[in-house]
Image (cartoon, grey):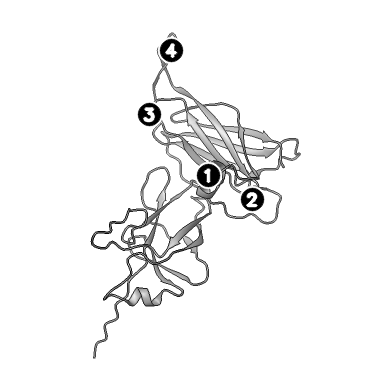
Amino acid sequence: MNECIDRRVFGAIEFVHDLTDARVLEPLQVTAPAGLTLLRNRSGLYVIRTIEGEDDYTRRFDDPPNRPARLPFTLNVQDPQACFLPQSFTLLLPRWLEAPGAPIDDADNALRPVSIRLIPGAALPLRATWAVLRLQVVVAGSQPPVGLANVLVEARPGAAGLGMRRTLTDRHGEALVIFADAPPILPDRGPAGLTRDFKLAVSLVLDASVVRTSTDKNHPLADPALILQRQTAGAAGVTVVTASEQLLRAGQSRRAVEKITWP
């Protein structure tokens, strides 16, 4: 006799390349808290299979609640190939289902995967046309230089058509700031009327709850979204430092060191 077992999933997670917006298909290490289980499918989505205490909801099809109470779950993701930085993120679960007369935004819909953007790491293969800044953030006066990990870097290009980029420093205090869409030639007010370089204004967001020196034994995984929330809310321990202005151009990689007083 064949037995049929139906169950509802609670949603899925889609990890996205921050530069290309493409789904990351290579296997990642995703760590979930106790009571939450995930399963990677063939499409590269990480399906949320079970949530402790919600088994009745996942098997109840006759009259399921379309908006059950939700709780926050913090997960970690790491790339074994080191092409992307390890980071943490928080989900509100379970995701919700649409019901007649009760539409649900994509940000909450169980049938829409949650997109988590992965930040480029040191091992990411670089394309020859990209404009790249390899920025190291170090403690001022340290010898040898001591890096600062988990600093949120905000880079605003002074070129039309290029948007702001955010990245994080790794455990050595190094960050990759990449503009994959930088044009090779830009308009300029100088005599030639054209230039290859564009200015880059850089700000460093230092959240004391996650920033650590490269010599510290323990490095928590940072959640970029949470750092931004704390910055916006003016949380204690969050400071913003204006870094030195940089010049970049398409097809070139440049290095810079920013010295910060810490703590």
Q: Choose between 206 and 215: the one closer to the eye.
A: 206
Mark 3: amino acid: Gly
Residue matched to label 2:
209
Q: Amino acid at mark 2?
A: Ser
Distance from Cα at disc 3 to Cα at disc 2: 34 Å
- Secondary structure found at label 2: loop
Say the numbered circle drawn on residue 189: 4
Of the numbered discs 4 and 2, the one sitting upstream in the chain is 4
User: Residue at the location (28% across, 74% down)?
Assistant: 63
Q: Does residue 153 appear to the left or right of 7 in the view shown?
A: right
- CA separation, marks 1 and 4? 35 Å
Q: Nearer the viewer, residue 114 or 67?
A: 67
Q: Which residue is mark 3?
A: 161
Q: Position of residue 224 (x, y in %)?
A: 52, 48
Q: Residue at x 57, y 34 (%)?
A: 203
Residue 143 image offset from top left, x and y in percent: 76, 39
